[in-house]
Amino acid sequence: MAARKIGVLTFHRSINYGSYWQARCLVEGLRARGVDAELLDHRSRRVEWREARNAFQPTLPVRTDPRHFAALGRKTRALIAAVDALPLSPPFPLEDPTRAPRYDTVVVGSDEVWNFRHPWYSGASIFFGEGLNTDRLVSYAASVGNHDAADGIDNHWLDRLRRFHAISVRDENSRALLTGLAREIPLVLDPCLQFPNVIPDAATPAGKRYAVVYGHSFPDWFTAQLRRWADRTDTRLVTIGYPSQIADEARIDATAADFSSLIAGACAVATNFFHGCVFAIRHNRPFVCAASPYRRNKVQDLTRILGLQDHLVAEGLSDTAFADRLAALPADLADRLATARAASTRFLDHALA
């Protein structure tokens, strides 16, 4: 009997490490369950132009330093090549999902697939199941991103979500927004934590100890406190993917594999990105996160569920407490991860039955 064919619908071509890894982990994790899973390779010139512009101009220094611009070009090409190597459907227009292949089930997520404030995917009806040729719609770890639940959701979109056989999300804000569906909506783990074996382990490299800086547009108090910590502890700061004025070394052109291995070899991680936290957790590295308003909904529930709230830091934290956060993760983290992973597995067992 042929394996069931499952399509995974997400932001797989967004030019950042988190989008690549969450897409890869979900599709490969599903394939490990014995199904024929592939990513729906939707294309849009409008989206690709916006992605490229964002990739090359995330921060001001990129516009003034040609070395940063060239490194971001290498990073972008490497990420595109990595995505092209994943299991993909034949390409089809984002605006015409009827041209996508037929699937027994389409899994929508992970990522901000239902974010009505997303700068270029907002309102794309494909992520609400519109026009897809499938018998069954499921969401896994979907999110509405920084669209606040208090702002509500139109019945137009709720009606489309009512056609989903099973829905799961990755944060409370998303769950609160969807209360009008009148069904149980579980919180599940990001695919990178649900299917951690997809991400290779990496040996700790020899040499001077270092901490990873991942993100951009950090608040001044955070970068100042991080630099003081690095100087006191004789720790090199290595920035991945983006320029940083406080880093000792820049790995702006790191590949997706480099991103993971650099975090695995670090003594700690400083970030304001969701997947910066996720990969620190995956590789059991202590971290501090200064969540921006755009990403706060993502990280606050991740840290709460796993008992890591203290690693989400704010201005006014003492240098001693800041250093404590970068020294170790809680001893019960493995148990909390196992509990959350089991709950996510139960959802998948039901949703894909």
Image: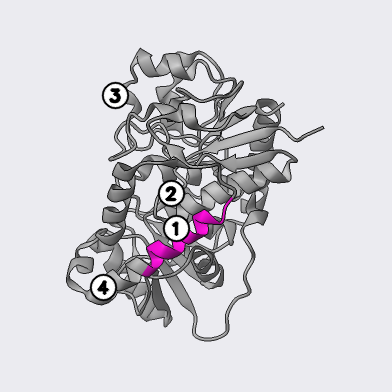
| Residue with the most extreme right position | 1
Q: Which mark is residue 80?
A: 1
Instruction: In this rendered view, identify the residue nearer to me: 321 or 168.
Output: 168
Q: How many residues crowd around disc 1 within 10 Å: few (fewer than 14), some, or many (20 or more)? A: some
Quarter of the image holding residue 177? top left
Amino acid on which disc 2 is placed: Arg
Q: Which residue matches tag 4?
A: 245
Viewer can see residue 177: yes
Q: Answer with mark 2 or mark 1, whichever residue precedes in sequence.
A: 2
Image: magenta residue range: 74-86
Residue 100 % position (x, y): 51, 32
Amino acid on which disc 3 is placed: Asp
Residue 143 horizontal side relative to residue 188, left or right = left
Q: Answer with mark 1 or mark 3, whichever residue precedes in sequence.
A: 1
State whether residue 303 is above or below residue 116.
Answer: below
- The N terminus is located in which quarter? top right
Question: CA gap, disc 4 to disc 1?
Answer: 27 Å
Q: Are marks 2 and 1 in contact (CB under 8 Å)?
A: yes
State whether residue 206 is above or below residue 115.
Answer: below
Q: Answer with mark 3 or mark 2, whichever residue precedes in sequence.
A: 2
- Tell me which secondary structure the magenta stretch mostly adopts: helix
Q: Which residue matches tag 3?
A: 151
Residue 197 % position (x, y): 67, 55
Q: Are marks 1 and 3 in contact (CB under 8 Å)?
A: no
Q: Which residue matches tag 2?
A: 13
